[in-house]
Amino acid sequence: MEVIITKNKQEAENVTARIIEAQLLKKKDSLLGLATGRTMENVYRQLIQLHKENNLDFSSSSTVNLDEYVGLSGEHCQSYRYYMNDKLFNHVNIKPENTKLPDGMAADIPLECQKYEDFIKNYGGIDLQLLGIGTDGHIGFNEPGSSLASRTRIKTLTRETVEQNGPIFGDNDQVPRHALTMGGGTIMDAHKVILLATGSSKAQIIADAVEGPITAWVTASILQMHPSATIVVDEEAATELKNYDYYKWAYDNKPDWQQLY
Ligand code: GLP
């Protein structure tokens, strides 16, 4: 695991966008795994800027998102499909047909989940998976207790997640109780993963995920077993890390021959 601690939120977002840019420059037809949430909004703004100002090209790339609420159509302004169109896809040259999210309106949910897994596998896997983290340690919507080997499936959201996302919906009662989400096993199969967390509300859970035991009760802790995981945090989200000095030291002493990110 590589932990990159940046001096502020903006730099953490910038580093994350640059890692995605580097992936696209290396492999134009990358399959990018994308995430939603407030944390990602500025990352997508930066990618749009890189597209407009540096001609960052999305035309050969494809995307799969981590998750989607059950019962919300893509037109619903709180659906993750709407979020992705609004915050990224509508502003870059990606082909709409190359952008995939699980269909939360699917009549046959197990079939929809299987098709999602098959698509990723047939593509050759996810080249780079972007992740945020919930305050209960979830990645995607893999709530505490989720099997670390799970695949795309339906999950019931915890009360904490409903409350965390309540303000976005205006009211906790409006937050769907279920979501379709990639599983821990799906995420672990990605060739590279990058988790971004900013702000003091994520400090304790970042320490648990990075330095605590690997446990289904903090599903992000599974990334300790990933061969290529980068954790990008700002100073506020890094305050509880015991190995803080080492992460800084390791980044400052990163060999020149290794790529910057
Ligand atoms: C939701 C998403 C997660 C995301 C989390 C954190 O629960 N399913 O993928 O990481 O929110 O959101 P935020 O970035 O708003 O803190």
Image: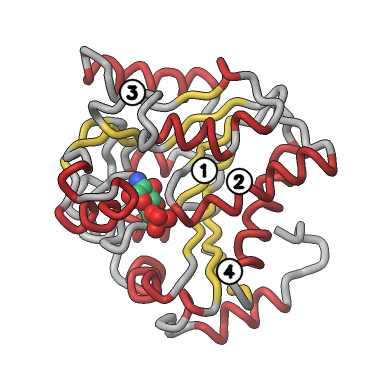
Q: Residue at x 19, y 50 (%)?
A: 172
Q: Name the residue under label 2.
A: 44
Q: How far apart are marks 3 and 4 (CA)?
A: 32 Å
Q: Is residue 190 left or right of residue 109?
A: right
Asked if disc 1 and disc 2 are in contact, CB closer than 8 Å, the reply is: no
Mark 2 vs mark 3: give the one in front.
3
- Classify mark 1 as within 8 Å of ligand 1 or not, answering yes or no: no
Q: Mark 3 Cα within 10 Å, few/some/many (few <14, many 20+)?
A: some
> The residue under label 4 is which amino acid type?
Lys
Q: Earlier in the sequence, mark 3 or mark 1?
A: 3
Residue 129 tag number = 1
Under circle 4, the secondary element is helix
Q: In which quarter of the image is residue 36?
A: top left
Q: Distance between the residues labelled 3 and 1?
A: 24 Å
Under circle 3, the secondary element is loop
> The residue under label 2 is which amino acid type?
Tyr
Asked if disc 4 and disc 1 are in contact, CB closer than 8 Å, the reply is: no
Q: Name the residue under label 3.
A: 73
Asked if disc 2 and disc 3 are in contact, CB closer than 8 Å, the reply is: no
Q: Distance between the residues labelled 2 and 3?
A: 22 Å
> The residue under label 3 is which amino acid type?
Ser
Mark 3 vs mark 4: give the one in front.
3
Under circle 1, the secondary element is strand
Between 220 and 158, the residue placed more toward the observer is 158
Residue 231's place in the image compared with 53, above or below, is below
Between 28 and 10, the residue placed more toward the observer is 10
Q: Which of marks 3 and 4 is nearer the N terminus?
A: 4
Q: Which of marks 4 and 2 is nearer the N terminus?
A: 4
Q: Name the residue under label 4.
A: 9
**Residue 163 location, x and y as percent?**
21, 57
Q: Distance between the residues labelled 4 and 1?
A: 20 Å
